[in-house]
Image (spheres, coloured by chain):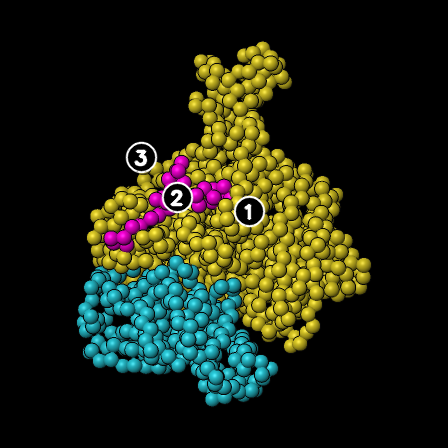
Amino acid sequence: MSYLVNGRRFDREPAPGQCLRTFLRELGHFGVKKGCDAGDCGACTVWLDGTPVHSCITPAFRAGGRAVTTIEGLGRPGAPHPMQRQFENAPGFQCGFCTAGMIMTSATFTEEQKADLPRALKGNLCRCTGYRAIEDAVKGVGAVESAAPGKAVGKSVGAPAGHDVVTGHAEFTMDTRIDGMLHLKVLHSPHAHARIRSIDKRAALAVPGVHRVYTWQDVPRRRFTTAIHTDHLVDPDDTYILDDTVRFVGQRVAAVLADTVGAAEEGCRRLDVAYEPLPAVFDPEAAMADGAPQLHGSHDPFVRDPVHNILIELHSHIGDVDAGFASADVIHEGTYFSPRVQHAHLETHGSIAWMEDGRLNVRTSSQSPSIAKVKLEYLFALRPDQVRVFCKRVGGGFGGKQEVITEDLVALAALDTGRPACLELTREEEFTTASPRHPMTLTVKLGAKSDGTLTAFQVRNVSNTGAYGNHGGETLYAGGAAVMIYRCPNKKYDAYSVYTNTVPSGALRGYGMTQPAFAVESAMDELARALHLDPLELRRRNTVRPGDPLVALHDGPDDVTFTEDGLARCVDLVDGALARTAGGPPPGPDWLVGAGVASSLHETAPPTEHLSEAWVTLGDDLIYELAVGTVEFGEGTSTAHVQIAANQLGTTPSRIRLVQSDTDRTGFDTGAFASAGLFVAGNAVLRAANAVRDRILEFAAAHTGVHVVMCSMDDDGVTCGDRRVSLAELVALARRRGIRFTAARKAYGSPRSVTSNTHGFRVAVHRVTGEIRILYSVQAADAGVIINPVQVRGQIEGGVAQGIGFALTEHHYVDGNGVMANPNLRNYRIPTYADIPRTEVILVGSADSVGPMRAKGMAECCINPVAPALANAVHDATGVRYRALPLTPERIYGRLPAEQSVSAG
Amino acid sequence: MDLNTITEVVRRPSERPGTDWREGDAWLAGGTWLYSVEQPDLRRLIDLTALGWEPLVPTDRGLEIGATCTVRDLYAFPWPVRWTAGVLFRRSCEAFLSSFKVWNAATVGGNICMSLPAGPMITLTVALEARYELWAPDGSVRFVDALDFVTGDHRNILAPGEILRRVTVPEHALRARVAHRRFTLTRLGRSTVFLAGTQQPGGHDLLLTITAGTTRPVRIAFDAVPDARTLRRSIDAVPADVWFDDPNGTPDHRRHLTRHFAEEIRRELTAGDLT
């Protein structure tokens, strides 16, 4: 049987049980992606004789004798299919990992299907966009703009990789073939807590194709933290690559290295492991109790109280909360719970390592190659010059890739065998072993005068860091943002990050602020009700204003400045938008309608060390090469970096060539997280571009004899007074004198600014079934000076959509033994097209940012007010307060009053 | 996903497959579920689609659906106007969590044999009083009421090597009036409950089928449309352990929704004269 793919014949036979997806990739069609490998996400969609199918659940042999079309065959670079062009122009993508599947599906739509996109697109998941951009793409609505020379900032220019993304040619981590590459598979612990007595490798090693079995005895006995921060001391060193004690269901027990994935899987099944089960504890309060099972010893002084499983605790008291409560007219107290939720970026974690000229090379799906490199140097005792780590395009991150959880094993295997080795996580492993959001329980107690003035503000936060402490401390500190947003002379914040026998929590968009924002913004809404005040009025009365100190955990000097009242304007705009859209009829007689709002405040860079270096060089080809370490995974920093450089160099984005995220070719960059890709790395780009511009202008001034103040960049030339000198001439002249126009500049994440936002929802709640429908959604955000309007809108829409998923449907179902019951996208339901309403995005301009071009990063903050605004709207609609997420119908219906008149929202 | 333990696919099985059934075998129809989860115990797949079973055969006694009929074919089936219950074909297909792309391969028989509580082909065939024709490896044939086929979550009465050959929907059921209700935790998501009520044309009976909310289908027959209290009592009589608990719903909520939607179906089929 032969196979016809994109018009080309292949005579190879697939393995008997092989699916079409991997077969097509083996044949070199890397545009066919793996999001779930289970038919749920649609990223692998291809056509069989023109009919779209999910290639991951299509037996490969069924393609025999039929015509297969992949994204690469739909159109070509330079000659795309109309649907590819529409996705580029909308733009209908962010990370681009779902895009091939979206296009291969949408390109088949009938008019009837185009009229019912919620149904037609229910088999295609996108985690980045919130689907509005995809709707635009399918309908042919375009927003990408071109920019005149020197005018790139403020224009919605397209992503540098846009054309490659829509044609299936953008290379992601696993989209490569290396001869002789070996495959790793991991055996996971079935126990929540156990000591490994022994591992018999013999049967596994006897499996044909198995090369190695790695256990705790085969790895460096070096504790480290998987969390990525420049300062490794902000996380405890409590993790081994492989350990002789397992502390959660799913933890690595052993890794098998083999010629094929199938052989490695068989090797895992043949391992004979003797466990000594230990008592386990899943709840952080129980874990803190006397006599609870103890997870960790006392190896790292970072760990505050190992006997009570307390990784870290914070206690801060400013003023006198007791006096504050004593002077309050009204006191509200409530306990609010945010559950464990997952990033569900469409590209699973994966990495590939090989040796080249005696150096370790690692290609990985990470948010920070620079820090991944440092960790590998530490783990394997390598000099910095012996390691290179780089990223191709990354398929979504959201914080999930601010973690080293695959690179260590592939590096181990490559160093050990000298052969290339790869590890690609399955979707199930994403859920059971990658780092979800910290479940947090917060008790908020607020005191206020009858006019709404806060007199006391007290928070107790218990955070579940899981079995390891990666990000456990920093997320706890970050929670202070929800306390900082309101002025109050008396504040108390007590917080605990607690080890339990559950999957280690980690970084996720909002990073320790989302859960406290849910608690505090819900509590403020309840306080407003108790005071008979408009919740927005209560906020206006208490939010911090320019000139106020930002006080969360300490009242002292800080590096955060703001001089404009962006938050007040956000509140007013959302207030106005809700008023303007009020009065519509409920969806039916059984629906209760209500509205709710919430705000949040976010610093534009993390408080820990954050560094970035950018290099700009004008090449002989008269193209500026911009080299910066920041990874692109859909957050759009690459576009913004190119825009900043083009703007400063007086040219267009087409004359900037971006080199990124490669420790051999770019300078150090802490990583793309905490919205720092724009704020910190963007500042480095700005300074490097300015430096090169200044050098060119000075050179041109000297050459022409015109004073430098009379010289300006003019696309491919320099205008000096009334004369124009081409860059070609200048470069040639400079080269003769041994001069190159090149500069490197560093930026640091301090001082910082604040960004703020307010979200409003109007919802309907079905009084019998408990179903929640979003009738209207609006977010106002202070994004500072906007570098790329369509990207900012896209970040907010995407963050809102993810926030809606976290608030309404998503959570890990974990049974009494610590086993997750829904580790797949079929039962862990991230929002589909049908689940997400359109959000009206209102941008508030401000000019108080110390970021590049006075811009503010927008990728993170947008998610924080979503859940509390929803809970507040549900309360307004039903009269019932729900203090635990998610707000699923089965939790809603039982507490609804049996009979209730329909309120007008 | 790749099923790496599979060493053989029987691409051209005999007309009566199953005679050489052995441990590690699995029937392959669309493969859309089989390839969606790890199958470490399987060694051999037997491709049923190669047998070319007729997908949809309308007769004067009703409708025969070949087990390998794709969901796409069922969805596109132009049923005769006399089959008033034919609307349930489309609604049941739309109840799939999966999209139209999966329907291009997924089969009616595959969904039934997977025997998940939310299997909409189970809802359809139980509500329409279908019978299943099962072929045993020894060549014998048995017929069972669709109601009796699924015995629990992912469990059914099939013996090893036994195969679902066809589904026969009787003419009288196809001519019934039908009302249906479905609830999902997410829009267009997997069914939390899926109920269908049928009534013979001109009759006053009610045949209520409850699925998705229960680990196996439940069918309650009333000779005459009951009053609301009687209906509710019949639902409350469903044993507590039959209400399904999974990420798509809790037992309490499912019972609550079933009461609510059953009452709506009752009212709809009494055409207003009891409301």
* Disc 3 from disc 1: Cα separation: 43 Å
Q: Is residue A883 above or below residue A420?
A: below
Where residue A559 appears, as percent x and y from the top left, is 65, 41
Say which chain tag 2 marks. Answer: A
Q: Is residue B268 visible?
A: yes
Residue at figure coordinates x 44%, y 75% from the top left: B84
Residue at figure coordinates x 67%, y 61% from the top left: A584
Chain ID for cyan? B
Q: Which mark is residue A532?
A: none
Residue at figure coordinates x 20%, y 78% from the top left: B139
**Which badge, 3 or 2, comes first in the chain's sequence?**
2
The quadrant in which residue A175 appears is top left
Where residue A190 appears, as percent x and y from the top left, is 38, 65
- Marks 2 & 1, CB-CB < 8 Å contact: no
Q: Amino acid at mark 1?
A: Gly
Query: Disc 3 marks which residue?
Result: A357
Where residue A780 appears, as percent x and y from the top left, is 65, 49
Q: Amino acid at mark 3?
A: Asp
Query: Disc 2 marks which residue?
Result: A168
Q: Is residue A341 above or below residue A78?
A: below
| A130 and A757: which is toward the camera | A130
Residue at figure coordinates x 32%, y 40% from the top left: A355
Q: Which class describes the residues within 10 Å of circle 3: few (<14), some (14-19), or many (20+)?
A: few
Q: Which residues are magenta?
A: A63-91
Q: Which class describes the residues within 10 Å of circle 2: few (<14), some (14-19), or many (20+)?
A: many
**Which badge, 3 or 1, comes first in the chain's sequence?**
3
Q: Quadrant of the C terminus of chain A?
A: bottom right
Q: Which class describes the residues within 10 Å of circle 1: few (<14), some (14-19), or many (20+)?
A: many
Q: Which mark is residue A794?
A: 1
Chain ID for yellow? A
